[in-house]
Image: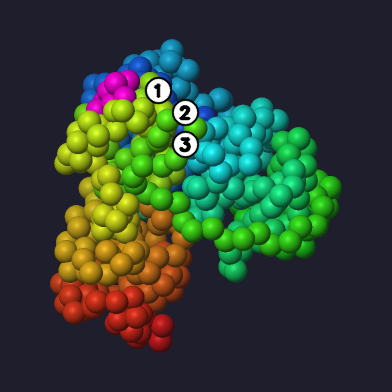
Amino acid sequence: MTAVSTLMRRGWCPGVRRPMATGDGLLVRLHPLGGRLSVDQARLVADAARKHGNGHLDITGRGNLQIRGVRDETYPALLALLEREGLVELEGDGPNRLTVTSPLAGIDPLDRFDTFVLARAIEDKAHAIDGLSAKFVVAVDGGGSMPLDAIGADIHLLPVNESNMIAFGVPSSDGLQWIGATALARVPEAVADILSGYARMKKAGRTEARRLRDLERDLVRELADAAALEPTSPLCVRPPAPRAGILHAKGGKAFLLALPFGRCGSAQLEQAAAWSERFGMGEVRLSFTRGILLPGLAESHLVTFLDEARRPGFITEAQDPRLSLLACPGKPDCASALTPAPVNALRIASACGPLLSQGATLHVSGCRKGCAHPSQADLTLVGRDDGRYDVIPNGSTQDATCLHLSIDNLMTRLLPLNTLDDLRCAFAESAR
Ligand code: SF4
């Protein structure tokens, strides 16, 4: 067994040190803090993806970057290269990166604090806690224009209106449940208290929950009390984060480039780096919306930039119907996939343009794991081993259904639909 093979184990949360075997080779996932890469790092990663992988990259729903198609024989050179550049996660079995922030961290005029600074403080204080699953994540949300609500983190942090307090939320079937609040300066310590308390509960056999978000309510309460969180009231729900277009930011405009299904070729990453160097502040930021944010664009360059950015490969308009379409890599890229999800998603989308342009979300998943979108969609389709799809209206890949349709049957049903109400009625028998 080679050194690389010993590192491969399907089901891991992959990193650079822990590549994962997939249908198109090894998948190597980078977790830069805040999703930030200098243009030089972005170019280096793009070049490495071409040399050591198959040139395909994905941006994940937590703003991480995956290099696909890495070969056993090229992996050691890739690891050495990324280590030299400081792009490798710390050793250990815990989270590769514990926090996720908006790509506007530090420059969002609506944020109530610098989320990048707080995320770094949380990493310093809590990253090394033993006993956390690799998937653990804390969403550090400054209350600005890119809410992180849909991420489904273990802990969501959000400022309480007009105060210096930060509320702690955990996902529940009724949305985020706010379990308490503490002063901004105490947040890293309180996060560490909660996470280490959970790890102790797990070690003592008091819970089977693999994630904090799945923990029994009375144990969540116990953790909130131990972290000295003060009572807080529910916070306002904000509109979902924009997925493409110009955003207001400090130090110039920011532009959020979207990519169909978050898939990004080496050439696209290099192009984004080149634009940031010419028109912006020499940095690219990977977004949890599965796109790339270019910060610090000078107003005087916007017209030229937009002219160039509206080329094939990038989505630049927030109204683009492809933004309502979610799909994982599917077959053949993922070894667990039962169907070619992105190909089928584009086919299905051709039958429901009017629905997508009204903002209906359509999620096509190659299997029940639902990597591309852990939460609900207006229509979720889960690949089956007979090539058909489980059809789940207004639900997630984890929800049950008794309706299984082929692509052709799905298209026949979708073609006449015009409104979200039509969609709700079209698959009513799925709930039988
Ligand atoms: S959801 Fe898609 S990418 Fe994730 S394991 Fe299943 S087929 Fe693979």
Disc 1 Cβ-to-ligand 1 distance below 8 Å: no
Mark 3 lies on residue: 249
Q: Quadrant of the N terminus?
A: top left
Front residue of this view, candidates 81 and 378: 378
Whether the residues at callouts 1 and 3 have beta carbons within 8 Å, the answer is: no
Whether the residues at callouts 2 and 3 have beta carbons within 8 Å, the answer is: yes
Residue 16 at x, y = what percent? 43, 28
Q: Which class describes the residues within 10 Å of circle 2: few (<14), some (14-19), or many (20+)? A: some
- Distance in Å between CA atoms under marks 2 and 1: 9 Å
Residue 208 at x, y = what percent? 66, 56
Q: Is residue 146 visible?
A: yes
Q: Identify the residue at image location x=84%, y=47%.
A: 228
Q: Quadrant of the C terminus?
A: bottom left
**Element assignment for label 3:** loop
- Distance in Å between CA atoms under marks 2 and 3: 6 Å
Q: Identify the residue at image location x=80%, y=50%.
A: 229
Q: How many marks?
A: 3
Residue 168 at x, y = what percent? 69, 51
Front residue of this view, candidates 331 and 45: 45
Mark 2 or mark 1, which has the lower sequence index? 2
Residue 38 at x, y = what percent? 40, 21
Above or below, 289 relative to 114? below
Q: Is residue 12 visible?
A: no
**Element assignment for label 2:** loop
Please state the extent of the stretch shown in magenta in the rendering: 269-279
Mark 2 lies on residue: 251
Mark 1 lies on residue: 281
Amino acid on which disc 3 is placed: Ala
Q: Give left or right: position of 357 versus 174.
A: left
